[in-house]
Image (cartoon, grey):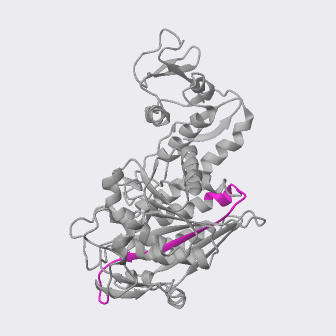
Amino acid sequence: MISNYETKRNDSMLLKAAFEGQKFPDYVAKSDNYITEDFESNVAYVYISKDVKNYYDFLKVVDSIILSKRRNYQVDILSFVETGLLNAQDVLRAFVNRLVYNDAKLYSAKEKSKSKDKNPVEITLFYEDKQYVKFVKKLITIAEAVNAARDLQITPPNVATSEYIAKEVKKDLSEVKGLTVKVLTKSEIEKLGMGLLLAVNAGSSHQPRVLVAEYNGNPKSKEKFVYVGKGITFDTGGYNTKGYHMDGMKFDMSGSVICAYAVKAIAQLEIKANVAAVMMLTDNAIDVHPTMPESVVKSLSGKTVEITDTDAEGRLVLADGLYYGAKNLKASLLVDVATLTGAMTRALGRTYSGIYSTDDQRWETFEQAALLAHEKVWRMPMHEDFHKPNKSSRVADLNNYNSSEKSDCNTAAMFLKEFTNGVDFIHCDVAGTADIKGMGTGVLVATLTELAETQK
């Protein structure tokens, strides 16, 4: 639906903004988001009321334009900027993001219709300032990475197993210049000593995988950001089964693909930064030899963990992934992304991603990246009081869950901090934002890409 960014008029109908309170032709219908067309002048106007007050309101206007699909439009970006509601970058970002998002080719096993649209609608962006050409290409690259993550998010768990995801992502990312990709097999994971990942995988009929994608775009810098993603391809809860409450558990691998495709976008854009993605892939199932509650397992870090709840498996696989990022990949900043806790959805609903940071400056940098990407994030507290429940085991260094603790999202963040080896750490709980109404969102791909540009 979006072909390119143009600095000259084409033959398509020019779509302009008609903001309430501003000057526009009398014939324009004053109905929210309604498009009035003038065939004589080959110009159309979309009416935008004063109720549109920010970027997120504006996205709804863009969606209405896309869904109208009347004919080819060339969008006059300047007309949407003139009121000062949004700057040119934000208007371009809104159009590119929604156009690419809505045009995603996502997994579907439905029988394809043989009839094809003979007259597909095309929307192009018209803005005479050539300096934005590179910016639009950046936006398209990021938006396509978001769609790639969404495609794997929505793929059913009987298809998107740990082996399948590792194979598909490796194939895709290996084609990108500057990206090196390796996949650790079960025997390699055993040799490393990732006991927590193996404990979660114990009841699975599929082998675990750890995919590591590295991009060194700034060899002169000592900084290295490592993005660690939770990749639970389906979460039954193990012995602590979820029972009938398993709708949407295929999305429990979202963090892993979000991290991987952020790194892909960073490499494609040739950002001067050193980054790596670590995908921790397995399902959490019950089979012949699953891990039992109250089992004690040794982690990659050497710390022992009493697995008091097999349904608190995300923090287990992340623990081994974070320590791997700190020690083996020499991270200067660790960022994990995970659909980690139900407590996060109760705290922030499906509006904000909950973010924890061990360092104020790192948080401020992350927040600025999220603001640029227009992704909603909210800082959550890290305090030693939340760590006390993690240290209540009588037989191990830590336990992974305490049923008496009501703020489990905070407790989980403190548990993960134990495995960062003192490296600056940002934990992103996207339990409420990774999927909305049965669709993956690819949330934070854009933020993580913007974050890489802050690396010095």
* Front position in the image: 172 or 196: 196
Asked if residue 346 lies in the magenta stretch, the reply is no
Magenta part of the chain: 265-290
Q: Position of residue 36 (x, y in %)?
A: 47, 19
In this rendering, would 293 be left or right of 215? Answer: left
Rendering coords of residue 302 (x, y %): 49, 86
Of residues 287 and 159, the one drawn nearer to the viewer in this rendering: 287
Q: Is residue 406 left or right of residue 440?
A: left
Name of the residue lying farthest toward the top: 26
Q: Quadrant of residue 16?
A: top right
- Residue 148 in percent (x, y) is at 52, 58
How many labels, in total? 0
- From what the image shows, is residue 47 above or below residue 140? above
Is 191 drawn above or below residue 358 in the view shown? Answer: below
The residue positioned farthest toward the left in the image shown:
244
Left/right placement of residue 180 relative to residue 299 reads: right
In the rendered image, the quadrant that contains the N terminus is top right
Q: Is residue 176 visible?
A: yes
The answer to whether residue 82 is above or below residue 326 is above
